[in-house]
Image (cartoon, rainbow, N blue to C red):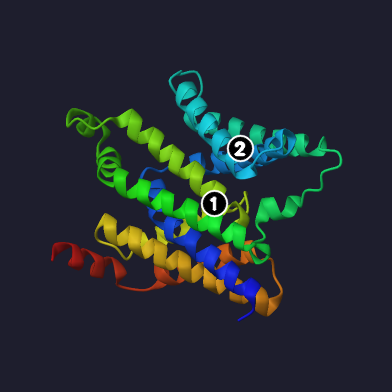
Amino acid sequence: MDDFIFRALLGGLAVALVAGPLGSFVVWRRMAYFGDTLAHSALLGVALGFLIGISVNLTVIVLCVSLAMLLVLLQRQRRLASDTLLGILAHSALSLGLVAISFLEGVRIDLMAYLFGDILAVSWNDVWWIFGGGLLALVLLLVLWRPLLAVTVHEDLARVEGVRVSLVSIGFMLLIALVIAVAMKVVGILLITSLMIIPAAAARRLSSTPEQMALLAAVIGSLAVAGGIWGSLEWDTPTGPSIVVAAAALFAVIFAMPGMDMLRRGAARR
């Protein structure tokens, strides 16, 4: 196996292992559009990183978290619906990022790589960043697992039981921002949310417990990464979109399988 393929596979698998479990909560909490909004804002973070001259990954995380806090504040007013706010912020942040990049004179930026990923070009430094960020995200998710699950099932009941709902929600937003920064090199800003949602949605049909769904989402995401890289090399297609296509194909196969709902209910009763 060529070295660049090995690096791509390692980086992609690391992202899949954390995106699957986190994506399960995104699916349960119906926050797919929220994830899209944060992902689209990442391009503005990239532009700010180049403008200020600091780590792009750091500015992406800071901007995503700041935008998440802004969303929380804006959602407290009742003038606009949440989906309207998300749409305004998502497209405004993406457009601002594109405009800001156009002002970066003397700095060459591979815009397509940021938008759709460039996993075959990851360096060992990128791999270590992905593994480090992914491991941190997994540890934080394990710490937040029970309170986050309680808030997801019934927010008011969780608050009565002493769960710090606001703190848990902020932690969850921080996790999404961290995973976006980690996965940016793999599937790109426009496709990050799909790597969280599609494997989790496919795993939902096969699972009878939250833990099963999180584990299966990670497995399905890993298979999608491996399949997407193989397909990209075999047919000379862009790797990031190929990974998402592979995930969509796995989703379609799983949902086409007969009897899976009855099997899941039977496992849940046992």
Q: Quadrant of the N terminus?
A: bottom right
Please state which amino acid type lies under the numbered disc 1. Answer: Val
The residue drawn where x is 28% and y is 38% is 151
Name the one closer to the observer, 40 or 264. 40
Please state which amino acid type lies under the numbered disc 2. Answer: Thr
- Dot 2 corresponds to which residue? 59
> Whole-percent x and y of residue 127?
56, 61
Q: Quadrant of the C terminus?
A: bottom left
- Dot 1 corresponds to which residue? 182
Picture mark count? 2
Q: Residues within 10 Å of mark 2 (few under 14, many from 20)?
A: many
> Whole-percent x and y of residue 222?
47, 67
Mark 1–mark 2 distance (CA, rounded to whole Å): 12 Å
Residue 172 visible in this rendered orientation of the protein: yes
| In this view, 213 is above or below 231 | above
Name the secondary structure under disc 1: helix
Residue 251 visible in this rendered orientation of the protein: no
Name the one closer to the observer, 143 or 53. 53
Q: Quadrant of residue 241?
A: bottom right
